[in-house]
Image: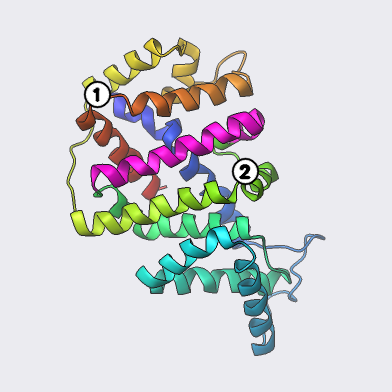
Amino acid sequence: MHILRTVLLIMALGTSLFLGWRFYETIRNPRGTDGTNTAGGNAQPTADQLASARRNVEKVLKQSPEFASYFASLDKNYPSDYMHILAGFISRATKSGHAETPDYYITEAMRVLRQNRGILATKASDFSLQRVFEQQLEVVGAMEAADPRVCAEFLHGGATDGFFEFSKGHRALMARLAQAGLDAMLDGQQQNVERATPSDADFTMLDGALQANGLDRPQIETLLDAKVQDPPLSDTSLCKAGRVYLETLRTLPDEIKMRIYALALTLQART
């Protein structure tokens, strides 16, 4: 069934994949620069250490006015999730001995919220659902222009410091991406729209539309089948394919497009 083709490497899950395994590993085992735990092994942090870590984290969170609205909205609408996320930041800072960057914190907040509430976004109105993917398209387009290598790694679910450098230079863009996801969850909680699973015919139409929009078979197979090409696609070719994929999705008939969008967000929530 064509639906299985989306599980491994559907472009719209690039964000989901990137926000998944790499950050889980780094949070599970934060280390100092010398590879050792800077907080002293498994010793429990003192109250002073926790208070200091909290001050440092909150200071960093205030460094980026672009992200302030997102965190305020998260705190207002999902206070328990916000406190859980903040506690994770503080724990990490206590163990590592330093706070992270605003770009790390917005990315990690998106990941945790996606795991906790992401399924709600699949039930959002067409407008809110569309906005999530419009923002993903903006991110991919900006990455393509800035650095195709980072763009390709993003689409592959890779994890490099280049992503955080990109975020640092495009914080307003990343804030819109984060807010679109949160807004879709809030909207889905209210609207509770139920959508059917995409059919084989839906994906056949998508495949044909990708070809009509200039993608060749290796590009389509890489996006929809996770097929490793020999030789592999260049970063520029893969990045272009990801952008065209999202551009093509929004031209499909609304019912088909929304079914595919909802499936993509469902897979994100379960990643």
* Residue 229, above or below 135: above
* Residue drawn 60% across the image and 61% down it: 27
Q: Pointer 1: residues within 10 angstroms few (<14), some, or many (20+)? A: some
* Residue 222, above or below 99: above
Drawn side of residue 59 relative to residue 254, left or right: right
Q: Nearer the viewer, residue 240 or 228?
A: 240
x and y percentages locating residue 65 in the rendered image: 58, 62
* Residue drawn 47% across the image and 55% down it: 110
x and y percentages locating residue 185 in the rendered image: 32, 56
Pointer 2: what residue?
159
Q: Quick one: SS at disc 2?
A: loop
Q: Quick one: SS at disc 1?
A: helix
Residue 153's label in the rendered image is none
Q: Which residues are magenta?
A: 125-153
* Residue drawn 49% across the image and 27% down it: 242
Residue 202's label in the rendered image is 1
Q: Nearer the viewer, residue 100 or 270?
A: 100
Name the residue type under label 2: Ala
Query: For residue 148: magenta?
Result: yes
Mark 2 and mark 1: Cα distance apart in space: 31 Å
Name the residue type under label 1: Asp
Drawn side of residue 186 relative to residue 236, left or right: left
Quadrant (top left, top right, bottom left, bottom right) of the N terminus? top left
* Residue drawn 38% across the image and 56% down it: 182
Q: Is the stretch drawn in magenta largely helix, strand or loop?
A: helix
Q: Please say whether residue 78 is visible from this viewpoint.
A: no
Drawn side of residue 134 relative to residue 29, left or right: left
